[in-house]
Amino acid sequence: MGKSSTSEPHTALTQWQNSLPFKFSLIQLVIAAILICSTAWVILSIQRQQVLDQQAVLNQNYGQLIIAKLQEMTSQVETVVGSISSIAKLYRYDHEQLVKTIPSLLTLDNQQRIISGGGVWPEPGAFNQQKFRDSLFWAHNVNDELVAIDSYNKDTFPSYHTEEWYRPTRYFPAGKIFWSKSYFDPTTHESMITASGAMWMDHQFIGAATVDISLEKLNALLRNAMVDVRGYVIALDHQNQVLAYPHGNNLQHQANTSHTFVTFNHLVDQQPDFSPIEAALHNADKAFIEEAVAERVFTQEQMQHLTRLSHQDERDMLAAIVNNNALNHFTTPKLLTSVTLAHDPILKTASLVSVFLMPNTYWKVLVVTPISPLQDTAKHLVEKVGIYLVCIQLLGLILLFLLQHRLFITPIIEIVQALKRNDSASIELKAKDSHDEIGLLAKTFLSRTQQLEVAMASLDASNLALEQQLQSQNLFQLELKRHKEQLRALLKFSQNLIYVKDLHGKYILVNDKYCEILGIERRRIIGASDFEVFPSQFAHEYQQNDRRVLHNNEAINFEEAIPSPLGNLIYIVTKFKIKDDDDTVIAVGAIAFDITLKKIKEQEQDKLLLGQVETLNHLQEQVRLINQHNNELYQEQEALTKMLEKHHQINLSREQSQQLMQNFLAEMMTQIMHEQDQLLAKVCQLQQTDEANYRTQITEIMVTQAEKLRHIAQLLTNHQNDIRPLHLAQFMRHLLGLLKVQLAKANVEIVLDCEENIIIDGPAWQYLQLFYRLITNTLNHAFKTHNEQREITITIDKSNDVLQISIIDNGIGMTEAQLTQLRQELEQELCLGTLTCINLWLKNDLNGSLTISSQLNQGTHIQCHWPLSTSLASQ
């Protein structure tokens, strides 16, 4: 055998591309390449993130420095605005003093470098009742001299009351400054931004004080702040108009030419590289507006009135600034976002942009700095690390290849060559010498070879035994065939249904009659279950009956319906168990007899009886539906009657209120006309005599008449102002002053308990109707002629957005029967008197209520309350 093996030509065991050394080397190279690339990627990612973090911290420091300088400037401007506002309120009616004082505030040394002008802008008639426009405004001319400008007071010039920098100030309290968007002043022909402060006197808005900032000086201030920094700053106002830009002269020239300011969106159209910043600004503005809407202070109607003259794209931001300023949440600079630019159009390199939001002014400051030097350092570091990693990986691969080839590739090749030569001695020698997995492989191969030889000998013996068993089975097959012929004849000629199922419900025998009834071939039935032959409802019933037979010792009769092409046929089925020689149940047999005709007759009788019962039930159901419909019509009629009665009561309440206010106004006009006649008579007498007492009487009548007219003006004109809320304490004092004559005639003293800070929304006309009806009702019904000390206490309280009104008198009160009847009328929502009509109005229009308590000869207590979220203006 050794000679034959040596004489064979030496051939390669396998092709080189399929050999283990080549595959292992290729896998190691791939793994090494993956490790080197992933390591370089991780190092570059970490280094890039560190670069971005360092640049973000640097930008934040630059941003804080620049915002600090801007806040220093804006604080000085806000101080000047506050000083002008205080001087204007102090010398409100002294025009000469205002002309002397305000220019000196605008020419202070520490503020003159940024301020281009300023002044005061009164409301119509606030400083001078004869003037609709009465502004005092100064601005620097081309020689940097502060001169007064009166163009805004001319009728040919648009009213300053509608300007963007003026309208929002009425929503700001004293001390709060509103910074407008940038605009081009038509008088001074200069681009600027205005800081406006509201002036309030006795809770009355009387105008605004302003200071203007030149955008050219602001741009120079920002350029000086970035002199020592590699980067630049872009400043935007709250409407994203460009305030300052590195190439600000070009933008300034465009603004002066077109009288419009360049927005950041227009800047992106010129420089598309700024597109990521545009998206970040849009998201920041959207989040700011949504946050302000979620915590809204002013109503939607007030904001619509404020922004109706503004551009459509600017309304939401203006409303958000007014609401946010009222909440006072935003007091420190805020970093909105940071954006990386792949190529900055000014720095000509990759840059990091940090967007800051300033408090009070709501300016956005964009700090842009380059990041390319740090990125180059990171790339050089990655290149050096990659070279070292490649060298280390190559050395490791060479060492690993040598070890793999010595430890297991060479032994495997030797075993394969021995198998090819059929040299079992060499394999056995290898198994004894090697104590690792290679030796174990050789030992296992030798063991399997010996087992295979034993198995071949055992297989020859088994073949001989199988031939003997085959002869015995042939004899049994002949006997079985004879019994099958007998069973086949029985199944073929029987008119009853016969079938057999195994214990799993599979058909193993059916006769011809069964196939004829079902209209299915035998080969499709044999081996199938009931679910494969019949619909599921029949199959469930058949299998349930089969299980009952298996659990019973005797045969059981069932009545089963069998579907056929002629319809469902009814059979009496006798089912029984089939056992083998060992008394073990092996199948279930069944014989079925047809009883379809009998069942058809029974079903016809049942159907006839069922039809009669259904007819009777149908008639009863129709009677029930008619009764139900009549009841529903009756209920609808009652509900409609109640609704009409309720609307009638509400109309009565409103008619009573209108009639009462007409009488009230007629009585006031009668008193004023009577006093006017007295005044005319006194004037005629004064022409005939010069006595001092006539002059005194005339003066008293004129004062009384002027006071009444002032009360009427405050009560009847406040409802025309849909912006200013209602000061309830002042409103009540005007009403009581107007009723002073009626109270004096009735000898009644009214004590008012109302906090000065109760300010509510809603038209004054509705509150006038409510309080006047309550007071006149108490005057008419609470007192008798013998009462000496008559007093009415009115208490007004506001808590948890609920307004509560309490009216207590020391009059005659009511008996228990009168009080019970009045409370019943209040519960039934009737309009039979003043209190019941007021109660009906409160419940239906304001979601409120009225309660009353009284004791005879001690007085009456009336309470009204309703939630302030229900606006009176909606009624």
Image (tube, rainbow, N blue to C red):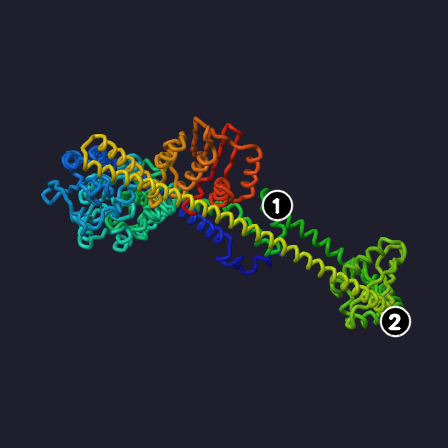
Pick whichever, 118 or 504, lies toward us: 118
Residue 746: x and y, percent? 41, 32
Q: What residue type is labelled 1?
A: Leu
Q: In this rendering, is residue 785 above or below 408?
A: above
567 up-or-down from 335: above or below: below
Q: What residue is at 68 percent from the left and 59 percent from the top? A: 626
- Residue at screen point 29% across, 50% down: 310
- Quarter of the image with the N terminus in it: bottom right
Q: In this view, does 687 lie to the left or right of 474?
A: left
Q: Quadrant of residue 817?
A: top right
- Can residue 63 be spotted in the picture? no
| Rendered location of residue 374, percent (x, y) | 29, 42
Q: Name the residue under label 1.
A: 440
Q: Residue at image x 51%, y 36%?
A: 851
Quickly name the residue at label 2: 495
Q: Which one is in front, 419 or 278?
A: 278
Relative depth, front residue between 620 and 540: 620
Left/right of residue 661 with respect to residue 677 in the rendered view:
right
SS at mark 2 in the image: loop
Query: Left of 835 or right of it: where is 735?
Result: left
Residue at the limit of the structure toward the top, as seen here: 789
Going by the numbered disc 2, the residue's amino acid type is Gln
- As measured in the structure, the alpha-carbon distance from the residue carrying label 2 to the one carrying label 1 is 74 Å
Q: Can residue 673 be seen in this view?
A: yes
Q: Do the residues labelled 2 and 1 touch (CB within 8 Å)?
A: no
Mark 2 or mark 1: name the one nearer the start of the chain.
1
Location of residue 769 in the rendering, given as x and y in whole percent from the top left corner: 41, 42
Categorize mark 2 by other alpha carbons within 10 Å: few (<14), some (14-19), many (20+): some
Q: Judge the density around disc 1: few (<14), some (14-19), many (≥20) Cα neighbours within 10 Å.
A: some
